[in-house]
Amino acid sequence: MSEPLKILLVVGFLLLILWNLGAGLYYLLIDKGTSKRTVNALTRRVALSIALILLVILAIKLGWIVPHGIGRAPG
């Protein structure tokens, strides 16, 4: 998997997560508790967050990405 594709995939997930978070806030303010749109938007946000975490773990296990340990001395 190419490096730009990996970055695009993660950024895409993050944008979808933010979109659903914003949708949840919007529905919370507009619906005043009369519908389940807020719960649905926040449920999608949690599901996307879990999927992103699992995808990163899988990518590390398969060797697609290599954690570099920020702040560690090289070598």
Image (cartoon, helix red, strand yellow):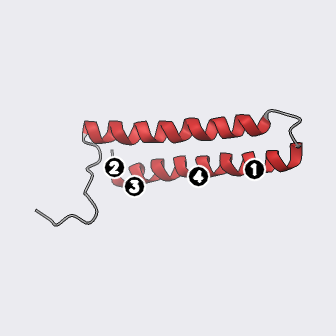
Q: Which mark is drawn over residue 8?
A: none
Q: Which residue is mark 2?
A: 2
Cα–Cα gap, marks 4 and 1? 15 Å
Q: Which residue is mark 4?
A: 15
Query: Dot 1: few (<14), some (14–19), or many (≥20) neighbours within 10 Å?
Result: some
Marks 2,4: beta carbons within 8 A: no
1 relative to 43, above or below: below
Q: Quadrant of the N terminus?
A: top left
Q: Residues within 10 Å of mark 3 (few under 14, many from 20)?
A: few
Tag 1 residue: 25
Callout 2 crowding tier (Cα within 10 Å): few <14, some 14–19, many ≥20: few
Residue drawn at point x = 49 percent, y = 36 percent = 51
Marks 3 and 2 close (CB-CB < 8 Å): yes
Q: Earlier in the sequence, mark 2 or mark 4?
A: 2
Identity, as a three-letter code, of the amino acid under mark 4: Leu
Q: Which residue is mark 3?
A: 4
Of labels 1 and 2, earlier in sequence is 2
Q: Nearer the viewer, residue 75 or 12?
A: 75
Question: Percent x, y for residue 15?
Answer: 58, 52
Circle 1: element type: helix
Residue at left offset 63%, top offset 36%: 44
Amino acid at dot 2: Ser
Question: Do residues under tags 1 and 3 come within 8 Å of each other at their CB atoms?
Answer: no
Identify which amino acid the numbered label 1 is placed on. Answer: Leu
Cα distance between the residues tagged 3 and 2: 6 Å
Q: Position of residue 71 (x, y in %)?
A: 26, 66
Kindly report the distance in space between the C-alpha atoms of the residues bearing marks 1 and 2: 35 Å
Camera-near label (1 vs 2) is 1
The amino acid beneath tag 3 is: Pro
Q: CA distance from mark 1 to mark 3?
A: 31 Å
Query: For the residues marked 2 and 4, what is the alpha-carbon distance in whole angstroms?
Result: 20 Å
Most distant residue in the left direction: 75
